[in-house]
Image: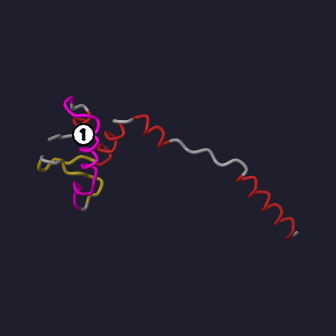
Amino acid sequence: MFAHPHNVVTAPDLSREEKRAILASWASDAWAVESAPGLRHCPGLAGHIVPVDAVLDALRSLDPEAAEQACERPEPARGTRKAGVRWLTQRLSRMA
């Protein structure tokens, strides 16, 4: 039983996969507080509640490289924007 997601991350006797499974379960809607979807009940600790953001942060901390890659913006395809501009320019020039 863990009172906070950070306790799961720092548990020395759990593998990364076990930690990920515990936190993913905790982040699920099964532990959501009724009428407060941003909060989660702590499994096994009656009356103890944590923000779902803390659970998600703990999940991301298990694999920081993947979290960084997920936040990176893909580069736009080259030429896509220019082609659209040319089309608009040609269309506008036909209207004039």
Q: Amino acid at mark 1?
A: Glu
What residue is at 11 percent from the left and 50 percent from the top?
A: 46
Residue 63 or 46: which is nearer the viewer?
A: 63
Q: Which residues are magenta?
A: 12-34
Count of numbered tags: 1
Q: Is residue 46 left or right of residue 14?
A: left
Q: Which residue is mark 1?
A: 18
Overall secondary structure of the magenta section: helix
Residue 46 or 9: which is nearer the viewer?
A: 9
If the image is split into quadrants, where does the N terminus sit?
A: top left
What residue is at 29 percent from the left and 44 percent from the top?
A: 55
Asked if the magenta segment contains residue 74, the reply would be: no
**Which of the 4 image quarters holds residue 30?**
bottom left
What residue is at 76 percent from the left and 56 percent from the top?
A: 83
What residue is at 73 percent from the left and 50 percent from the top?
A: 79
x, y percent for residue 53:
32, 46
Outermost bottom residue: 95
Check the image and report above or below for 94 versus 73: below
Q: Is residue 92 left or right of residue 30?
A: right
x, y percent for residue 48:
16, 47
Check the image and report above or below for 95 versus 10: below
Q: Is residue 36 left or right of residue 64?
A: left
x, y percent for residue 82:
75, 52
How crowded is the residue under tag 1: few (<14 C-alpha within 10 Å), some, or many (20+)? few
Outermost top residue: 12
Asked if the magenta segment contains residue 30, the reply would be: yes
If the image is split into quadrants, where does the C terminus sit?
A: bottom right
